Structures are given as C-alpha cells and as structure tokens.
C-alpha cells in the first residue's frame, strides 16, 4: 500500500482560502498522486473554526493576527493540532502545504506587517508537524517530494 500525503485543501481546488479562492496544483505529479488515492486533505484554518471568507491573517512571533488586529492564534492552534492528528491517524509520509500561508508556509510567510513582504519562516501547522517529525514541503517543491516519495515507496 502506498503511503499517504497530507495536502492543503486549497491545492485540491477547495474554496477554503481567506479570500474564498483556491489555488489548485495542476502539476501532473500532484494529479497522479490524487488519482492513486494518496492525498489526505485539510484546511487548518477552517478546521480551527475560521469562516470562509475571513480577514487576512499573518504571524507576528507566536501570535497570529488579522490586519485589523484581532488575535486568531487560538483558531490557528486548534487547526494545527487537528492537522497533526490527521497526519498521525493516516500515517502520512510527508505533507505538501500552501506556501506563504500563516498556517501552512514551509519556507516563507508574510512578515506580519501586512505590507505584502515575505520573510523566511513557517506557518503554525508546518511548525507543529515538523516538531513531530513530519517532512513538510510547499507546492513549489514537487521535485523534492517526488524524490522522497520514490525513496519511501521502495522501503
């Protein structure tokens, strides 16, 4: 049986982003993994109790706040914990999460100033998954994912 891959629901075309949009990943490898039934999806922010659409949020240290200053750290934490539980339940091999997101970013996130500037960092869900030994990649790192999946499949 092939190992599962945890993915951000927006990458599958689910309209769960803060702006009620989606960002489907149309890479043939991603579609192949979908057809193989490998993908387990979640939107940590929605599972954490935030609506769609919702105000844009960014990390500011250990807090997550909206552009108008509302603290949504608790919702982000609930979503991160639910995502970790899903990953553990499905024994996923790795995760492909939405780059730049305050939940899912794996290399860069917005810098917390709401000025469209990005900084090296990771979202809260990515941080928690990595703390528990899961490899997390962005949708722009499918070459690395493909290599890891190939290695895992031969184990």
Image (cartoon, helix red, strand yellow):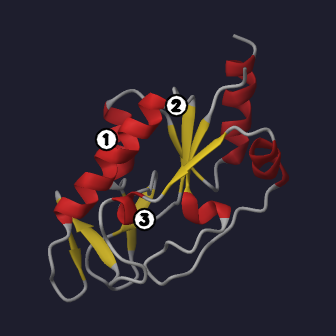
Residue 119 in view in this figure? no
x, y (%) of residue 14? 60, 68
Q: Which of marks 2 and 1 is nearer the N terminus?
A: 2
Instruction: Give above or below for 137 relative to 88.
Output: below
Q: Do the residues labelled 3 and 2 touch (CB within 8 Å)?
A: no
x, y (%) of residue 45? 36, 64
Which circle, 2 or 1, is nearer the viewer? Answer: 2
Q: Which residue does the image show at 56% across and 80% down from the upper left?
A: 21
Quarter of the image with the C terminus is top right
Label 2, on which residue?
90
In the displayed image of the protein, which residue is found farthest to the bottom?
68
Instruction: Give above or below for 33 relative to 71.
Output: above
Q: Which residue does the image show at 85% across and 53% down from the upper left?
A: 28
Which element carries disc 1, helix, strand or loop? helix
Q: Are marks 2 and 1 in contact (CB under 8 Å)?
A: no
What is the crowding at mark 2: few (fewer than 14 residues within 10 Å), some, or many (at least 20)? few
Q: Which of marks 1 and 3 is nearer the N terminus?
A: 3
x, y (%) of residue 126? 39, 47
Task: Measure the alpha-carbon separation of dots 3 and 2.
Answer: 23 Å
In the displayed image of the protein, which residue is found farthest to the top?
155
Instruction: Give above or below for 92 relative to 11.
Output: above
Label 3, on which residue?
101
Left or right side of 27 for 122:
left
Left or right side of 122 for 73:
left
Q: Which residue does the image show at 51% across and 82% down from the upper left?
A: 20
Residue 49 in view in this figure? yes
Label 1, on which residue?
128
Q: Which residue does the image show at 46% across and 59% down from the upper left?
A: 43
Q: Earlier in the sequence, mark 3 or mark 2?
A: 2
Is residue 1 or residue 5 the one in the foreground? 1
Which element carries disc 3, helix, strand or loop? loop
């Amino acid at each position: 049986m092939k190992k599962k891959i945890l993915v951000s629901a927006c990458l599958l075309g689910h309209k769960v982003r803060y702006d009620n949009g989606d960002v489907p990943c149309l890479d043939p490898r991603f579609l192949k993994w979908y057809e193989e039934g490998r993908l387990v999806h979640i939107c940590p922010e929605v599972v954490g109790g935030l609506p769609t659409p919702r105000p844009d949020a960014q990390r500011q240290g250990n807090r997550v706040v909206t552009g108008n200053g509302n603290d949504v750290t608790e919702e982000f934490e609930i979503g991160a914990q639910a995502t970790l539980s899903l990953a553990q339940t499905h024994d996923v091999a790795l995760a492909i999460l939405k780059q730049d997101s305050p939940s899912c970013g794996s290399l860069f996130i917005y810098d917390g100033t709401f000025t469209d500037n990005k900084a090296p960092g990771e979202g809260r869900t990515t941080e928690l998954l990595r703390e528990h030994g899961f490899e997390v990649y962005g949708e722009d790192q499918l070459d690395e994912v493909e290599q890891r999946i190939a290695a895992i499949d031969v184990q």
